Image (spheres, rainbow, N blue to C red):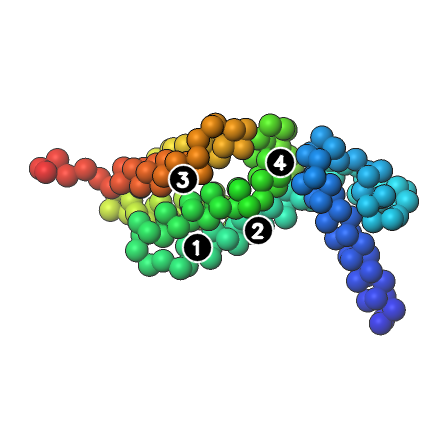
């Protein structure tokens, strides 16, 4: 039994080594520079061994994408739980999303298709997705309005389209300073958050 456990651990370690090597190559050369031969050379294995764990390069992309979504979900959940005020909670969650994108540029690119084809449609989603976390927080802010599922989606995608768009142009290069981009992000999140509240017609 101990021998089987050891073999399983070794397999898991090798699998993780392959993924780590793949991501290291991507960070150095971009996604277009990734191939199975380079991964094998990086960890000093033969290419056939790599194929024992992953059928092809796309299988590695899917695995890295899965890890990216899992990590992003955890960060958003932590950000949500650090605040009690509904406004600050939602803003902290989008800040976590923003920070993740720039701390993990290459993962974000493959997760959301920035300058490349993403593979998010082929992954197994985590138990709780970023989408669900945001939708639930938006629903809390709009509780007195009893929004429909469709209305909640519209609000979520209003946030996402603006923030993802800003992240994307940042990654491609928009010529603005980091401080300016940060301020645009904060202003956008604040403005959209305020729009979630029902306007007082008597004001």
Closest to the observer, 164 or 54: 164
Q: Residues within 10 Å of mark 2 (few under 14, many from 20)?
A: some
The residues tagged by marks 4 and 1 sit, at their Cα atoms, a distance apart of 23 Å
Nearer the N terminus, badge 4 or badge 1? 1
Q: Is 21 positioned to the left or the right of 68 in the image?
A: right
**Residue 38 falls in image quadrant:** top right
Nearer the N terminus, badge 1 or badge 2? 2
Q: Is 32 positioned to the left or the right of 76 in the image?
A: right
Label 1, secondary structure: give it: helix
Mark 3 vs mark 2: give the one in front. 3
Q: Do the residues labelled 3 and 1 touch (CB within 8 Å)?
A: no
Residue positioned 52% across, 50% down in the render: 73
Question: Where's residue 29, x and y in %?
Answer: 71, 35
Count how many numbered circles sit on residues in the image: 4
Residue positioned 57% across, 30% down in the render: 114
- According to the image, label 1 marks what residue? 79
Nearer the N terminus, badge 4 or badge 3? 4
Mark 3 vs mark 1: give the one in front. 3
Nearer the N terminus, badge 4 or badge 2? 2
Closest to the observer, 86 or 18: 18
Q: Are marks 3 and 2 in contact (CB under 8 Å)?
A: no
Q: Is 63 positioned to the left or the right of 115 in the image?
A: right
**Furthest-bottom residue in this view:** 2
Residue positioned 53% across, 42% down in the render: 102
- According to the image, label 2 marks what residue? 71
The residues tagged by marks 1 and 2 sit, at their Cα atoms, a distance apart of 12 Å
Q: Quadrant of the C terminus?
A: top left
- According to the image, label 3 marks what residue? 179
Label 3, secondary structure: give it: helix
Question: Where's residue 40, x and y in %?
Answer: 85, 44
The residues tagged by marks 4 and 3 sit, at their Cα atoms, a distance apart of 26 Å
């Amino acid at each position: 039994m101990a021998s089987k456990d050891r073999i399983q651990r070794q397999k898991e370690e090798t699998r993780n080594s392959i993924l780590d090597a793949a991501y290291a190559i991507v960070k150095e050369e971009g996604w277009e520079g990734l191939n199975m031969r380079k991964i094998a050379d990086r960890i000093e294995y033969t290419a056939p061994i790599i194929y024992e764990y992953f059928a092809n390069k796309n299988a590695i992309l899917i695995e890295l994408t899965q890890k990216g979504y899992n990590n992003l979900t955890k960060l958003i959940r932590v950000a949500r739980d650090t605040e009690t005020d509904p406004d600050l909670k939602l803003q902290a969650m989008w800040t976590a999303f923003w920070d993740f994108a720039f701390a993990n540029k290459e993962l974000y690119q493959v997760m959301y298709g920035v300058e490349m084809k993403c593979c998010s449609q082929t992954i197994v989603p985590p138990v709780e997705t970023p989408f669900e976390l945001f939708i639930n927080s938006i629903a809390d802010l709009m509780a007195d309005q009893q929004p429909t599922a469709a209305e909640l989606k519209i609000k979520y995608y209003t946030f996402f389209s603006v923030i993802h768009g800003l992240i994307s142009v940042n990654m491609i290069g928009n010529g603005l300073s980091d401080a300016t981009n940060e301020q645009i992000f904060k202003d956008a999140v604040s403005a959209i958050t305020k729009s979630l509240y029902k306007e007082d017609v008597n004001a």
